[in-house]
Image (tube, helix red, strand yellow):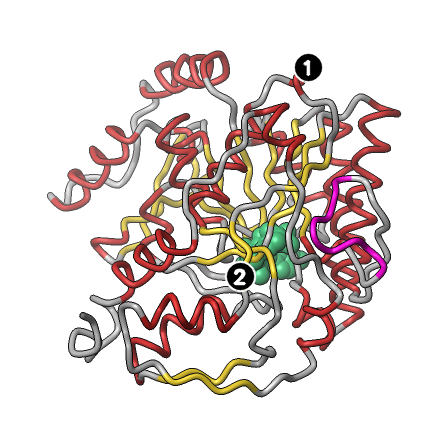
Amino acid sequence: MHIIDELLFPKLKKRIVVVLSSTRPSLLLASERRMFARIFRRGQVLCVAKNLLGKNRSFHATLRKESPRILITGSLGQLGRGLAKILREKYGRDNIIMSDIAKASWDVLESGPYIYADILDFKNLQSIVVNERIDWLVHFSAILSAVGEQNVSQALQVNVEGVHNIFELCRRNNLRLFCPSTIGAFGPETPSNPTPDLTIQRPKTIYGVAKVHMELLGEYYHHKFGLDFRSARFPGVISADTAPGGGTTDYAVHIFHEALRQGKYNCYLRKDTRMPMIYLPDCLRATVELLEAPSENLKMRTYNINAISFTPEELANEVRKFIPRLEMAYEPDERQAIADSWPQVLEDSNARKDWGWQHEYDLNAMTIAMLEALAPTVKSSAAHLH
Ligand SMILES: NC(=O)c1ccc[n+]([C@@H]2O[C@H](COP(=O)([O-])OP(=O)(O)OC[C@H]3O[C@@H](n4cnc5c(N)ncnc54)[C@H](O)[C@@H]3O)[C@@H](O)[C@H]2O)c1
């Protein structure tokens, strides 16, 4: 017997070394994890009997047949946690492996398997795919637009070199791959209202350039090697429970926090800057639906998805229906030039036709959902809400 790994019990605030003769804790059933927790609380033993081994082997075989095992890179960002939750409900908690390069909160550790995975380290990625028997990969690691402009070499490393690793990994191991693209993959020469799937792409940020590279490489790997690559161009994502990661559309999240907290918001874009946006639950549902779509239905490999398009002024007016005293100021900074080069409305009829994409949240429904989700957490908000 030897120590091979650790089990984490966030409620006990303990990291427990479990002695096993084989297998990995991430493959253990939830009931087995609970049993270990009970054993520990009673202060009995910390080791797992060898006779669990056979059970785990057959459990492993069952997993393989019934559900895909899915690795999510960059899963601690704005989109990863929510996606892991949905996929775990569908495919089982232990079939979804969250990963990132940062320390996860106890909540994340308690919710299911979480591991360290730097997308710049190919060997480590390969060992994860082999050890965890991964079938599908959702690639969320990225340096977003505004942050990328502050650190171009880091953006190149993560968004280009990292993507090379992911494509090779998926090709060699025959994984299905979902990589989101973005409205940032277009540029000022692109028709902006509406923007079709196939059009001029001359982005002016390193983030956009890297995303065009990713789209083209994905389509090339699909054509050349049969890689099951799928991509959706996400609009700016609006979410209540996770913070945005430094994109140009972040104002559409910040405005809700500031409206609730102090009744005013200083926007870094002009009030008439129209951009496509999407509420997180719609974005995550699109991800799952495209990930699961039968391959033969996909006439393309990179799809626009559209949901809501609005300007900061239109959003402020919608928020004022619930917080009438909201005051807005507009002080455009360097993000204005990025926003000006992006589409205003995406044309997404191919996504709607090929895999049934439909958004649910319009501007009013998204605003209500955001305020309902944030009001309890933002102190002193109750007084502002009507
Ligand atoms: N959030 C949006 O509005 C939006 C819009 C369009 C497209 N997208 C795309 O969706 C994906 C997820 O976006 P997000 O908003 O969750 O991003 P985010 O910035 O919130 O999170 C990205 C994660 O990548 C991780 N990361 C950075 N370097 C890494 C490395 N070397 N190895 C592994 N992980 C690393 C970070 O730690 C972070 O947790 C990205 O590809 C992004 O381009 C997002």
Whether the magenta-drawn stretch holds residue 193 is answered as yes
Q: Of helix, strand and loop, which mostly describes the magenta segment?
A: loop
Q: Amino acid at mark 2?
A: Phe
Q: Classify the position of ligand 1 by quadrant: top left, top right, bottom left or bottom right.
A: bottom right
User: What is the x, y in percent for residue 292?
Assistant: 55, 24
Q: Secondary structure at mark 2?
A: strand
Q: Residue at x 45, y 27 (%)?
A: 22
Q: Which mark is residue 296?
A: 1
| Closest to the observer, 181 or 151 | 181
Query: How many numbered marks does the figure carry?
Result: 2
Q: Residue at x 28, y 59 (%)?
A: 373
The residues bearing labels 1 and 2 have C-alpha atoms spaced at a distance of 34 Å
Are the residues at dot 1 and dot 2 in contact (C-beta closer than 8 Å)?
no
User: What is the x, y in percent for residue 129?
Assistant: 62, 33
Q: Nearer the viewer, mark 1 or mark 2?
A: 2
Q: Which residues are magenta?
A: 189-197
The image quadrant that residue 354 belongs to is top right
Instruction: Count neighbours of disc 1 (C-alpha within 10 A) and say few if under 14, some if 14 to 19, many if 20 or more.
Output: few
Q: Which residue is mark 2?
A: 310
Which quadrant is the N terminus positioned in?
Answer: top left
